[in-house]
Image (tube, rainbow, N blue to C red):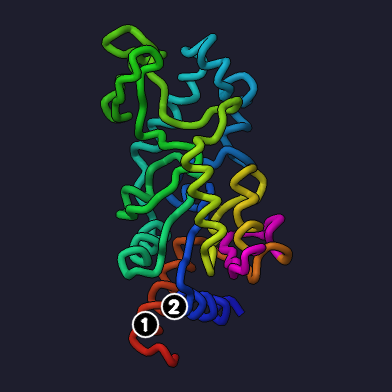
Amino acid sequence: MTEELISRAARDIVKAKKVVALTGAGMSVESDIAPFRGKGGIWEKYDPVEYAYIDVLIRNPGKTWILLSEMQKEILKAKPNPGHASLAELERLGYLSSIITQNVDGLHHEAGNKNIIEFHGNHRDAYCMDCRKRIKAEAISLDTLPPRCDCGGVIRPDVVFFGEAIPHQALTQSNQEARSCNVMLVIGTSAEVQPAASLPDIAKSHGATIIEINIEATAFTGYTSSYFIKGKAGEILPKIVALVKGNSANPAA
């Protein structure tokens, strides 16, 4: 059954005028980055109320940076997995219009994708909260927390904290992509975090086919999703890409 659905996904992608991918923590987990939610997730170790709200960062940056430093070390050593590489290949082949990602690890960039909407920002980028000078995460010393800019201001990663709004441009572009796509690949997302979780519903309401790929069923499964392919993105997506290439060479397949 899974192989049949993989073949169906490849055919749908080849036929579509516009394909968009929405990716969540499941993609990052396959690169050994811990998820925020669920068993073994970051929020089991760090209460987000105590560590991840913007007012905590402002009031007690040293405490927030205990969490951020652990995340930064994990993200900087992570490498794109075959799922990331497959999405980059789909874009290179001209089949993937954009990626909307909830992840902050920057691995889609590392894999080679160009058109990426980072819904929650990118932990590999940072800036000073005082002078706004931008800095790459790998250039930040974690010897003393919180890390500080040459001007003395606290450095923060360019990500969305609890209590902050999704950047207007990312929100607007994501909604535009959802409304205009024919196929949306929904990969490794829990379907729990709004407003990103509303994007597949928006796409479906505008006639898109929703292809869900995940290791377990979600709130999308059987409702928003047109069909559900159970498995790891790093195993499913390479198979889809291989068939897309075959279908491209033989459109009647």
Residue type, label 2: Val
Q: Residues within 10 Å of mark 1 (few under 14, many from 20)?
A: some
Where is 36 relative to 107, above or below? above
Q: Which mark is residue 14?
A: 2
- Numbered circles on residues, count: 2
**Outermost bottom residue:** 252
Q: CA distance from mark 2 to mark 1?
A: 7 Å
Tag 2's secondary structure? helix
Of residues 179 and 16, the one nearer the viewer is: 179
The location of residue 231, given as percent across then percent down, is 56, 64
What residue appears at the point 65 percent right and 70 percent down from the top-left corner? 226
Q: Is residue 229 visible?
A: no
Start-end of magenta stretch: 204-221
> Tag 1 or tag 2, which sits nearer the N-term?
2
What residue appears at the point 37 percent right and 89 percent down from the top-left corner? 250
Residue type, label 1: Ser
Residue for badge 1: 248
**Outermost top residue:** 152
The location of residue 159, given as percent across then percent down, is 46, 31
180 within the magenta span? no
Tag 1's secondary structure? helix
Q: Which of the 4 image quadrants contains residue 186?
A: bottom right
Of residues 40 and 164, the one nearer the viewer is: 164
What residue appears at the point 46 percent right and 67 percent down from the top-left corner? 18
219 within the magenta span? yes
Q: Residues within 10 Å of mark 2 (few under 14, many from 20)?
A: many
Q: Are marks 2 and 1 in contact (CB under 8 Å)?
A: yes
Q: Left or right: 67 with respect to 248? A: right
Q: Which of the 4 image quadrants contains residue 99?
A: bottom left
Where is 119 relative to 137, above or below? below
- Quadrant the N terminus occupies: bottom right
What residue appears at the point 56 percent right and 63 percent down from the top-left corner? 213
